Image (spheres, grey):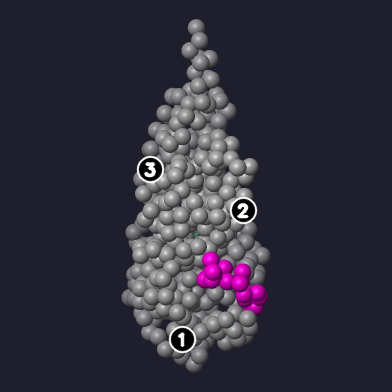
């Protein structure tokens, strides 16, 4: 990127310092919004910008804000800083290095929906980041940017951080709200959705850290400016967390629509040891496996094009798999994660992930027959569409796509066993 919009600390040293942030247009958008824009106007600009949620689902952000129920009060904002998807490490970099832009995004969202309280829900392991944000929030109070009667307008706002206990499910928005209320972190039945029934049953907007970090510049520079980045349906920039078998793993902020090839070979420096790329998981452990052929490498990374090659963009945690990696082994590792993280509320997810873990273990250890692979497929298919949240769906993506698209790896694993069994 010639100019960073989100990872601005890479170009502006000390942007995490309030004075430096303010010298670089910081809090101008918030001041402008609170003193001269109606709340609905802020939502309209965000809508027009084409910004979509960066937490995984890609839901249009301004549209979500416009769904807030205006007949029930108070309203809340909850920033999702749970960042638990294996392979995702972008929100952490933002909060550690460019915290005020993120906090200003939270504040603009709060103003747009007229919330007077906003929470930042962080995974338990981010306790140092929570303490860091608490210090930044205190600075904002001292500077008169948070508190009562802001800029003499009568609008009041307070921000609070809240630590989870390190459960992946608490990144799911309704489980997060339960956890924030002090209950067991398990998903709620929907509808109703958070904009009408959220925190304490009140209208709530839940947005990802990266999503909110886009907002100050959108309000400051306008929707048309933001639309100058990315594609028509996937506007703006995205942070791609690149990991796995790649020479230069890390966070890369690029326009949506950048190809996998550019990310992996130009920015990521290619595959170690000059080995062949085999598969791509574009959305972390929750992702289907894409066969990394020429067509896939030339696919633009946006919300429309990635599904066309059989996966989702998700939170864009792009994991690279090279030819040295055995797919049944990889799938066993991902299922181990989902089995551990299933909250247990829905039977298909709880029991299914348990059985998938045992079956993939048996396959990985070379102790399975093809019947076990068929059974694995059957168990995975039975989870589909039967759970309250997407964790169950996520758990079967790598399994089903792996068996379908890398069948030869499974055949090789069960082949030896079947030869033994069929001997007279
Ligand atoms: C199992 C599960 C885990 C999730 N984890 C996260 C997470 O760590 N961070 C996040 O922002 N969204 C996560 N999500 C998505 C949230 O439920 C929600 O869609 C998102 O926070 C909305 O924000 P956005 O519209 O800005 O993307 C998760 C969803 C599921 C089903």
Whichever of labels 2 and 3 marks the residue nearer the N terminus, that label is 2
**Residue at the spot of label 2:** 248
Mark seen at residue 384: 3
Q: Residue at x 50, y 74 (%)?
A: 105
Q: CA distance from mark 1 to mark 3?
A: 47 Å
Mark seen at residue 400: none
Quadrant of residue 69 in the image? Answer: bottom left
Check the image and report above or below for 145 versus 293.
below
Q: Secondary structure at mark 2?
A: loop
Classify residue 295 as left or right of residue 3.
Answer: left
Q: Residues within 10 Å of mark 3 (few under 14, many from 20)?
A: some
Q: Secondary structure at mark 3?
A: loop
Q: Nearer the viewer, mark 2 or mark 1?
A: 2
Check the image and report above or below for 377 versus 394.
above
Residue 231 visible to an observer of this rendering: yes
Q: Secondary structure at mark 1?
A: helix
Look at the image and say whether residue 15 sits in the magenta stretch. yes
Tell me where residue 262 appears, x and y as whole percent: 50, 55
Residue 160 visible to an observer of this rendering: no
**Residue at the spot of label 1:** 32
Look at the image and say whether residue 193 sits in the magenta stretch. no
Q: Nearer the viewer, mark 1 or mark 3?
A: 1
Q: Nearer the viewer, mark 2 or mark 3?
A: 2
Quadrant of residue 377 in the image? Answer: top left
Q: Which residues are magenta?
A: 1-18
Q: CA distance from mark 2 to mark 1?
A: 40 Å
């Amino acid at each position: 990127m010639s100019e960073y919009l989100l990872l601005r600390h890479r170009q502006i040293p000390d942007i995490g310092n309030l004075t430096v942030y303010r010298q670089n247009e910081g809090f101008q958008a918030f001041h402008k919004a609170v003193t001269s824009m109606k709340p609905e106007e802020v939502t309209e600009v965000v809508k027009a910008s084409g910004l979509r949620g960066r937490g995984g689902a890609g839901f249009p952000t301004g549209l979500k804000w416009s769904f807030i129920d205006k007949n029930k009060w108070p309203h809340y904002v909850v920033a999702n800083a749970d960042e638990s998807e294996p392979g995702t490490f972008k929100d952490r970099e933002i909060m550690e290095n460019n915290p005020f832009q993120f906090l200003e995004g939270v504040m603009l969202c709060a103003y747009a929906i007229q919330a007077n309280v906003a929470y930042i829900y962080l995974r338990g392991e981010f306790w140092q980041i929570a303490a860091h944000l608490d210090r930044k929030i205190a600075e904002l109070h001292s500077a008169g940017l948070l508190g009562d009667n802001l800029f003499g307008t009568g609008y009041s706002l307070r921000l609070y951080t809240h630590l989870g206990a390190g459960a992946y499910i608490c990144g799911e928005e309704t489980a997060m709200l339960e956890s924030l209320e002090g209950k067991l972190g398990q998903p709620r039945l929907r509808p109703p959705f958070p904009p009408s029934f959220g925190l304490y049953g009140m209208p709530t907007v839940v947005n990802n850290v990266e999503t909110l970090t886009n907002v100050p510049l959108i309000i400051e520079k306008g929707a048309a400016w933001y639309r100058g980045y990315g594609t028509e349906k996937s506007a703006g920039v995205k942070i791609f967390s690149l990991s796995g078998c790649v020479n230069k793993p890390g966070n890369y902020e690029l326009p949506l629509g950048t190809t996998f090839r550019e990310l992996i070979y130009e920015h990521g420096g290619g595959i170690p040891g000059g080995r062949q790329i085999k598969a791509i998981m574009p959305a972390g452990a929750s992702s289907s496996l894409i066969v990394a052929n020429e067509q896939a490498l030339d696919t633009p990374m946006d919300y429309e094009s990635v599904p066309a090659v059989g996966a989702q963009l998700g939170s864009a945690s792009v994991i690279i798999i090279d030819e040295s990696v055995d797919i049944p082994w990889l799938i066993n590792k991902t299922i181990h994660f989902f089995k551990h993280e299933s909250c247990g509320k829905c039977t298909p997810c709880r029991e299914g992930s348990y059985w998938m873990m045992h079956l993939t273990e048996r396959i990985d250890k070379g102790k399975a027959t093809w019947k076990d692979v068929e059974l694995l497929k059957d168990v995975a298919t039975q989870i589909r569409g039967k759970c309250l949240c997407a964790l169950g769906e996520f758990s079967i993506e790598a399994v089903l796509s792996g068996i379908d698209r890398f069948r030869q790896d499974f055949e090789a694993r069960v082949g030896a066993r079947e030869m033994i069994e069929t001997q007279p």
